[in-house]
Image (cartoon, rainbow, N blue to C red):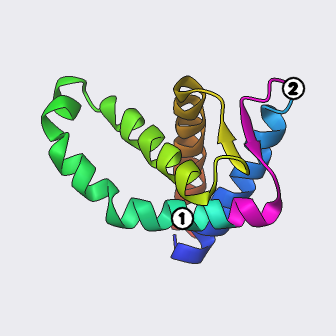
Amino acid sequence: MRFWQRVIIDAILFIALTGFFQQSGAFRVSSIWIALAASLVLAILNASIKPILQIISLPITILTLGLFSIIINALMLSLTSLLVGSTVFYFASFGTTMLVAIVLSVCNAIISNYFNRGV
């Protein structure tokens, strides 16, 4: 999938997940523009910092059979929250961040599979 498609899809997923967590207040995005900015920042972080973290954490990722990659994705989301602004892009806890990372990864895998098939 191309870069801008992924940014727009991530922004839509951020808005959808905000609606899902609206009652509990565990995850909040203040506007559509903040969701677009956060997805752009996340894409840049995934392209620049995430590969370094994956190489450094390769032994523990192998020991946990790949489950440590969820922690890395959650760290990327936490860093995104810090860079965008934790008042407009907010996670209540690291557990919520991990849950959002899991849902985001699963949805991106399904959507990427759909686009790669050419349907």
User: Counting residues from the N terminus, which is met first, the one under dot 2 or under dot 1?
Assistant: 2
Task: State which quadrant residue 17 falls in.
Answer: top right
How far apart marks 2 and 1 lie (CA) works out to: 26 Å
Q: Residue sitting at 41 percent across and 35 percent down?
A: 70
Residue 106 x, y percent position in the rendering: 55, 41
Q: Over which residues does the magenta segment extend?
A: 23-36
* Mark 2, residue position: 23
Whether residue 117 appears in magenta in the rendering, the answer is no
User: Is 57 left, or right, of 69 in this rendering?
Assistant: left
User: Is 60 left, or right, of 97 in this rendering?
Assistant: left
* Mark 1, residue position: 41
Q: Is residue 44 above or below residue 76?
A: below
Residue 26 x, y percent position in the rendering: 72, 29
Three-letter amino acid code at disc 1? Val
Residue 109 x, y percent position in the rendering: 52, 49
Bin the neighbour count of mark 1 within 10 Å (Cα to Cα): few under 14, some 14-19, many 20 and up.
many
Whether residue 28 appears in magenta in the rendering, the answer is yes
Front-lying residue, 32 or 118: 32
Q: Residue sitting at 65 percent across and 29 percent down?
A: 92
